[in-house]
Amino acid sequence: QMTTTTVLSSAKWTLIAAIFQKVLSFVLNNYLISIVGPAILGQSAIQFELILSTLLFLSREGIRVAVVRETIIVDEDRQTLIDLSWIPSFIIFLSIIVIVTVFPYYNSTVILLYCIGAFLESLSEPFYNSFQNALEVTARIRSETIGLLIKSIVTIVAVAYIRLEVEGFGYAQVSYGAVYFLTMLSYTSVSKITTENGSPILITSFRPDFQRLLTCLVQSVKYRISSLISPKPIQEPAYTLSITSQRMCSTAYNAFFSVFLKHWLTEADKVTLSIFTTHHDQGLYAVSNNYGSLVARLLFLPLEDSSRLVFAKTATEFTNSVTSTSKNKHQQALLALTSLKSVLIKLLALLTAIGILFPVFGVAYMDIFVRFVLGMKWQGLETVRTLQTYCFYILFLGINGISEAFVQSVTPHSSFGRLNKGLILSSIAFTAVAIPSMRVFGTRGVILANIASMVTRIGYNMIWIHEIFNNPMHMISSEQLINRHAIEMDTEDNISLFRRLIPPLRSACALLVAAIVCAISHEYYKTSSQDLIAVGVHVGIGGVVGIFVLVTYVCDMAAEDRAVLLEWLVRKNRNDKVE
């Protein structure tokens, strides 16, 4: 059974690699900030990164959601996974033709470079999805780390020494895509994935077989269109694929709209900034977003990725138990369901406790961060306030990441329309807040709009999670459902899911005291000479208060939670075996 220890263990090496990657990015960005102006940084980090993320996310995210949910055993299902994974490369290739045709003059060279980088990265999708499905996360870690290292070197050479400005970032992206693909390709030789007969998987095994897949997709589309037109139930077409392969295709098909909405919500700030602000303001936001989200990407993302795998696999165990003919299927399903809820509650509590620390300490110490990290060139009230606002945003990022990973992992493809409603509501919330907030608060208005959108998404996710645990049959698609009332949980126990988002009374008091002390220390620092002694006193007070809050957190943790944390931090060798 999947447990919280499994999530932390799976996230361990991902976290270590993420630390290295983000530290490297941190050093590189600091160096680039000192040599390029806000206008150049704004174009590369906002406009061209928006093109890159749009191409990659829309083409591959739905397929990634589909393939990670299934347990691949037979070669036929693995071939379907590989066939689906080649679709992003085809989509991006067509997109390159369209983009170059529509935008022949506006920074055509830079746009083409970013598109080529996206295409090269998409070539690794068959390998990426195969390794992720088999829980071989080392392939992704190795590819991302080596790719980032080469990208950093190319960026410094092209931007700092050759002075190619924005074009230099384009060449760096091409180098990342090429190295990422080649590294992922090379991992095939050491992969533990085997075929049905026990033979190791080879590079030639990743060749696509589009004819079989295309037949299934055409049948699926025809069936859905006919179902919408005809009021009478239409018999499901006779597929040539296995049940698992059918589910992968159907989930990828249904997930596209959710992926589109999620991408709009993720990149809405960049779209808004590209339309309504100057390159200078975009550069200011790029700096704030880069440093403000550093810890969120460093800590939250590895946990989210690992928990997504655990949620999907455990939900599959629950589905298989309920739909099986085993005599003890009720006990097996209940065990999987209990494991799901336990992991979710503990992760939500952990990320809430971590997220609250950012507004408590970040607001009081952001001006020191700007002074000593960003330097004189970026000092200004707008930069400080933008980063302070981002501290509140980080709190909601962590909660939304885990709650969304859960609902996307356990919701059957037939219920994806319900998830889309939540994304639509959060999109409306962002749009309603963004434009008036930008007029009043400037760059901070975009962050406030993101917070409004994130709160809407969290609320909708929590409602859906509550309904899932009230009636776990929501995790089973209609065609798989045998007995709607086969498994039930105590609905009153679901209250604990929401209580754990609120820190215990002792921790809440510690946080309140910390906020007051840090605020008083900050006011003293602002009215002082702001020399190194004043900085040392201010930082020292924050350190003492931080230790006080940390000790309170540990004392309030449940005994089993402390055991999990200690096992993750100390017994690393055992965690390797678990992984």
Image (tube, helix red, strand yellow):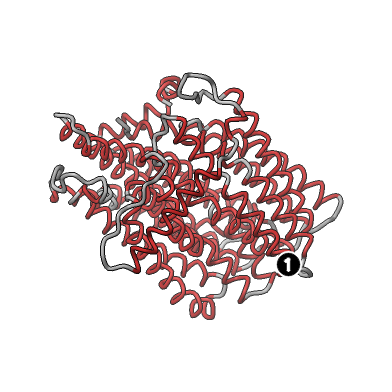
Q: How many marks?
A: 1
Residue 523 in view of the camera: no
Residue at point 57%, 36% (across, down): 127
From the viewer's side, name the closer residue of 6 and 224: 224
Residue 520 horizontal side relative to residue 54, left or right: left
| Picture quadrant of residue 149 | top right
Give the structural element (helix, strand or loop) at label 1: helix
Return the x and y of residue 478 as percentages of the image width and height: 25, 51
Q: Is residue 156 above or below residue 17?
A: below
In the rendered image, which quarter contains the N terminus?
Answer: top left
Residue at point 55%, 38% (across, down): 128
From the viewer's side, name the closer residue of 39 and 44: 44
Residue hosting label 1 = 101
Residue 165 in view of the camera: yes
In the rendered image, which quarter contains the C terminus?
Answer: top left
Return the x and y of residue 435 as percentages of the image width and height: 51, 78
Categorize mark 1 by other alpha carbons within 10 Å: few (<14), some (14-19), many (20+).
few
| Picture quadrant of residue 100 | bottom right
From the viewer's side, name the closer residue of 110 and 535: 110
Specify the amino acid type for callout 1: Thr
Return the x and y of residue 333 as percentages of the image width and height: 21, 36
Q: Is residue 112 above or below residue 204?
A: below
| Picture quadrant of residue 564 | top left
Return the x and y of residue 502 as percentages of the image width and height: 28, 53
Residue that extends furthest to the right in the rendered view of this protein: 162
Residue at point 49%, 40% (across, down): 81
Residue at point 30%, 59% (across, down): 234
Residue 361 horizontal side relative to residue 328, left or right: right
